[in-house]
Amino acid sequence: MIRKKTMENMLDPRTKLITAIFFTILVVTSRKLSWLLPEWAVLVAFVIFIGKGRAYARWLRLALPMALFFGAVTWWTADWKAGLTAALALLILISIFFVFFSTTTPEDLGNSLVKIGLPYPVAFVFSTSLQFVPMIGRKAGNVTDAQRSRGIPLEPGWSALRHYPAFLGPLLIQAFQLAEELAAAMEARGFGRPGRTFYKEYRMGPADWLTIAGSLLLLAACLVLRR
Amino acid sequence: MRSPFLIEIESLRYAYRKGGGKWILDGAHLKIRPDEYLLVCGASGSGKSTLCRTFNGLIPHFFGGSLQGDIRIAGIPAAEQSVDRLFATMGMVFQNPEAQLFNRTVEREIAFGLESIGLARSEIKRRIAEAATTAGIDTLLSKNPHELSGGEQQLVSIAAVLALHPQMIILDEPYANLDPFNLRRVRAALKEIHRNGTGIIISEHRLALTVADARRMVVLHQGRIVLDGTPEEVLKQGIERYGLESPLAVRIGRRMGMTPLPLDINSLKLKISSDKPLEPPASSALATPRTDVDEHVLTVDRICFHAGGRTLLRDISFTLAKGECLALVGANGAGKTTLLRHLNGLNRPSRGEVIVMNRPARELKVSQLARYVGVAFQNPNSQFFKLTVRDEIAVGAKALHCYDVSWTRELVGLFKLGPLLDRAPYRLSEGEKKRVAFAATLAARPAILAMDEPTAGQDMFFRRSLGLLLADLRQRGQAVLLITQDLSFAEEHAQRWLLLAQGEMVAEGSPGRVMGNQAAMQRAHLEPTDRFRLFGGEKN
């Protein structure tokens, strides 16, 4: 299978994680709008550069109300400037999360962390649980449909709270069943057997070291300049 | 001297840890050579899946429980071999594809087992390519397994164990949720794998699909092997007393005293002389008259449905009358369930109209439509939340404020649920769960009962009792909509079919008329039933 050389697989997942951590430090230490705005601009430019602009716009639709709510609470307890700063800082933090997970699969992240000592079962549980989130989402949809079809009102709203056992009961039972079947299937494919190798190679190359060094320098420069 | 058998089971008894001490396997004896194509069959609850789990050490190592007797794999007692030693020799494909595909891409799914046995990267790459080619999925390597069709998922699961170069592949009901098109693909892949020297063990109760492929067949009944031999030898002895249904060709061949017994329709046809016409077996649908044909309870008028930039339904129109059983047939992804969701308001048409009991469905909420259209979805586990069957049956009717004690009592009798009333619904067998779900749906006395794939994964006992129930319900004037890809069941119990393909209605009429429309059947990726291929159908 031919892999396209894209931004997504040019860098090792560990490099992306370290860079994301540096950027997070930069954002949480920024206390002024005039610092946050260029940071956001850099991030948005990067998102557009890697061709994830549309997905980011959709993501913003969900993230923006959350950031605005957080900003409004801060405004109420302090002033409008603090509110706006808090909202923007949260928005950038969520955006870092977006960039990281849209360029790194949980599987890659987990497997590359195994290389630096994370136990394989921990990494596997992390990546697999994320893989099954959409399936549990589909099951939740099926439960809601099945109950609504027999007159139990599970439409979104306060009244649904009264009927939460009708939603949670079948969902939990199915989740437990799925977990047991999954565990048996994993066992039958050798999960946990010592001496595992990895099909995908995770190696830190010159581009990785350059990126880490560059972002570290940038972080240090920003922190020094702001003092 | 080394034993010629790969699997040797003697006087095996097994009870699950939480099974209340019930022996699921109760004195089973079986010896299997490495190059066999073995069919393990038995009614629901006979112990098929449990037996399969002993072949790769999941029993006793993973499931625990009580085990007596002897299991040897490649001459070594199973108790001395853990699953991670056995898994590469005894590849296992489970019934539920969604729980056994846990990687992000097909390529990684196949790589997983190879990584477990510690192969080098270059060897993993070579084996992925080899297994994907044999299973016919080489174009799917970069896809997410959860976004594939049921048949493709099953092929990915097979490729994932095939890559390990096992001596034997064990498949637990591999055809349970497949439509005829995908079923053909999986069958062909398995035949090819067997030709290449890998042994195959299939646990299945849909025998028409498997007997012609298998070289040996064993019948399990109450945890014991009761019949063992070539498919012909076993089928000759009659398997109906064990809750299994012989394929139509075998039933006819047996009745006419043919030797050797024809195992499929093609071999039967070769044996029949043209001057001695066959008599078709009785069909309950043809025997039951259609009642109140003019009293329509449902009218679907040229509905279209678009979602996600795609047209999922296009210009669908039909009616359903009181006392009628109408089957909506089509392959996976044809749009059957999407259409069903329009009848009770879970989806609203982009164009056209659904009229239920003379009222436009768009004017009614889902909870109001539930009074008229009762839907029993394929997976009853999606609805059970009460602690007893008694409460589960009543909960919907109570929510709709139409709970009727005497009607509920009648339903309990009709569905034979009396002994189960105080049991927890999710602890029942799959067939019992389905019966509870049907009763719960009917408790609100809906004018229309819609059943989504009611026979999927069910054995002959269930299919027969469901058939009788449908006849009974129709006599009472109940309109029934069967949503199914089980054409044999639909042929027997529905008088009229609607054939869907790619969201369009491509044929309508009696089962014979629809199956006689070759172009439409091909477009829908379906094949006529054995009965139709032998006797044809009325062309009206």
Image (cartoon, rainbow, N blue to C red):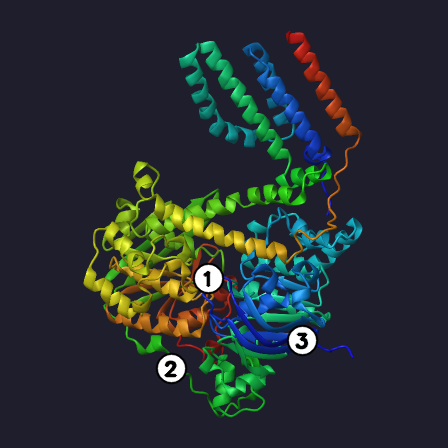
Quadrant in the picture for the C terminus of chain B: bottom left
Identify the amino acid type marked 2: Ala
Gap in angstroms between the C-alphas marked 3 and 1: 34 Å
Gap in angstroms between the C-alphas marked 3 and 2: 37 Å
The picture places residue B201, in percent across and down from the top left corner, at: 62, 71
- Between A186 and A5, the one nearer to me in the picture: A186
The picture places residue A162, in percent across and down from the top left corner, at: 30, 41
For disc 2, the marked residue is B282
For disc 3, the marked residue is B36
* Residue in view at x 44 percent, y 9 percent: A79
Quadrant in the picture for the N terminus of chain B: bottom right
Identify the amino acid type marked 1: Gly
For disc 1, the marked residue is B330
Q: Which chain letter matches label 3?
A: B
Earlier in the chain: of badge 1 and badge 2, it is 2
Q: Is residue B382 above or below residue B80?
A: above
Give the side of residue B31 with respect to residue B13, left or right.
right
Front of the two marks 3 and 1? 3
- Between A2 and B278, the one nearer to me in the picture: A2
Query: Quarter-wise, where is residue B10 in the image?
Result: bottom right
